[in-house]
Image (cartoon, rainbow, N blue to C red):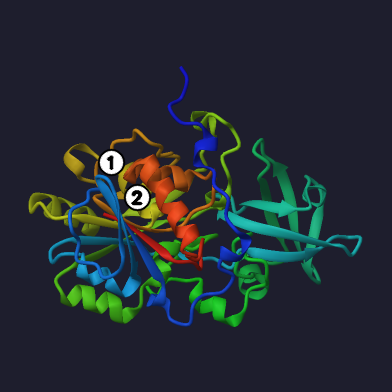
């Protein structure tokens, strides 16, 4: 069967200077492109562009409380970015890099590394005197299983770990990144990338929402490096989706049930929240509490069962994340929104501006 969409349908040309390399001075100072799936008026300040039955509004992130109603549920991903990037030395003296993805039950770690020939079974790289990383196996997808020699993984991360900034940020992490590449509500470490839609929130903004009667609840989805991986097959259904772990607390599951019963709206802060909620979805838009793993790939045609509204950032071309937001808002509308964002010089990707899909 010929797929309705090809991967090339999700491509676009982005001027390199629009890739945000630094965070703004104010977390909540970002611009906000509101994508209105219907052309009904919304209480958002800013120029409006009508697109037939839909519309775009150029606004600011500080306007967000104007459109979330009392009783609505705002869902956050509370994961914290792990200092998972380890710089090591090969026996030759050359450098190597290991990116820790997640621990295994036997004490080994799933990891990525470069150069690949330095991380083959039987080879070790050094972190410090008597402290080494040993490659146990190379998996079919190119990931490695590694183990620590002469040092525990916790000690290695604490002593040598660096914040793994995204590959499109062309600089080393700074002290500012230590604060700004984490959300203000981050809790347990487990991700190799930030849930970036949440980077715009400040404690004051969250307090404002809570004070207005908006219910706020969290879940965990451990963001993996696959979030940056472009879809390389022209048929998106042939893409091998990366696996990520998530956990839905009982409190959140109960809140979803209550909000559904009251005909209120569920707002997902980021594509990671969308994937977790939709992966845990059961009948009538409820979610199952507990831990799980997801390989859910959402493309146009997917029927959303839980999420009503989405806050997100701008995503890489040919990515599963762009396909997800296209499924939520409609392919034509999202691609039009991206063209508009480029024309209006929005800032893209992790430290960039935000998009709100209503």
Q: Is the residue under label 1 in contact with that under label 2 (CB below 8 Å)? A: yes
Q: Secondary structure at mark 1?
A: loop
Q: Is residue 165 above or below residue 320?
A: below
| Quarter of the image with the C terminus in it | bottom left
Is residue 289 shown to the viewer in this render? no
Q: For residue 202, which numbered disc appears in the image?
A: none
Q: Position of residue 245 (x, y in %)?
A: 44, 49
Quarter residue 157 falls in: bottom right
**Element on which disc 2 rests:** helix
Q: Residue at x 39, y 47 (%)?
A: 334
Tell which circle, 2 or 1, labels the residue nearer the N-terminal end: 2
Location of residue 243 in the rendering, given as x and y in whole percent from the top left corner? 49, 43
Mark yes or no: residue 314 visible: yes
> Residue drawn at (42%, 69%), measured in percent from left and top?
199
- Kindly identify which residue carries mark 1: 304
Asked which quadrant contains residue 64, the reply is bottom left
- Write down the residue under mark 2: 274
In the image, residue 68 lies at what x, y percent?
20, 64
Residue visible at 8% across and 50% down in the picture: 261
């Amino acid at each position: 069967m010929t797929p309705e969409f090809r991967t090339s349908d999700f491509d676009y040309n982005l001027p390199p200077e629009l890739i945000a390399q630094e965070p703004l001075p104010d977390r909540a100072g970002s611009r906000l492109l509101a994508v209105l799936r219907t052309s009904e008026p919304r209480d958002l300040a800013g120029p409006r562009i009508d697109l037939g039955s839909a519309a775009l509004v150029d606004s600011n992130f500080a306007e967000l409380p104007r459109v979330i109603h009392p009783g609505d549920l705002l869902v956050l991903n509370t994961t914290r970015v792990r200092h998972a990037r380890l710089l090591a030395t090969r026996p030759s003296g050359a450098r190597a890099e290991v990116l820790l993805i997640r621990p295994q039950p036997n004490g080994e770690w799933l990891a990525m590394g470069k150069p690949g020939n330095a991380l083959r079974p039987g080879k070790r790289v050094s972190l410090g005197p008597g402290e080494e990383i040993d490659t146990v196996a190379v998996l079919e997808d190119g990931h490695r299983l590694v183990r620590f020699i002469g040092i525990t993984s916790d000690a290695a991360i604490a002593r040598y770990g660096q914040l793994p900034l995204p590959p499109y940020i062309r600089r080393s992490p700074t002290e500012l990144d230590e604060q700004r590449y984490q959300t203000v509500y981050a809790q347990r470490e487990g991700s190799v990338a930030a849930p970036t839609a949440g980077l715009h929130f400040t404690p004051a903004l969250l307090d404002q929402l809570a004070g207005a009667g908006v219910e706020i609840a969290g879940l965990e989805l451990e963001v993996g490096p696959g979030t940056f991986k472009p879809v390389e097959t022209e048929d998106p259904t042939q893409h091998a989706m990366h696996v990520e772990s998530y956990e839905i607390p009982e409190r959140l599951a109960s809140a979803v049930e209550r909000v559904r019963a009251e005909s209120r709206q569920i707002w997902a802060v980021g594509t990671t929240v969308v994937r977790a909620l939709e992966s845990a979805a059961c009948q009538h838009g409820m979610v199952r509490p507990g831990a799980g793993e997801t390989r859910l790939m959402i493309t146009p045609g997917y029927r959303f069962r839980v999420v009503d509204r989405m806050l997100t950032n701008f995503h890489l071309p040919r990515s599963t994340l762009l396909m997800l937001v296209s499924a939520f808002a409609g392919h034509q509308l999202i691609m039009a929104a991206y063209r508009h964002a480029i024309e209006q010089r929005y800032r893209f990707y992790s430290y960039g501006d935000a998009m709100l899909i209503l």
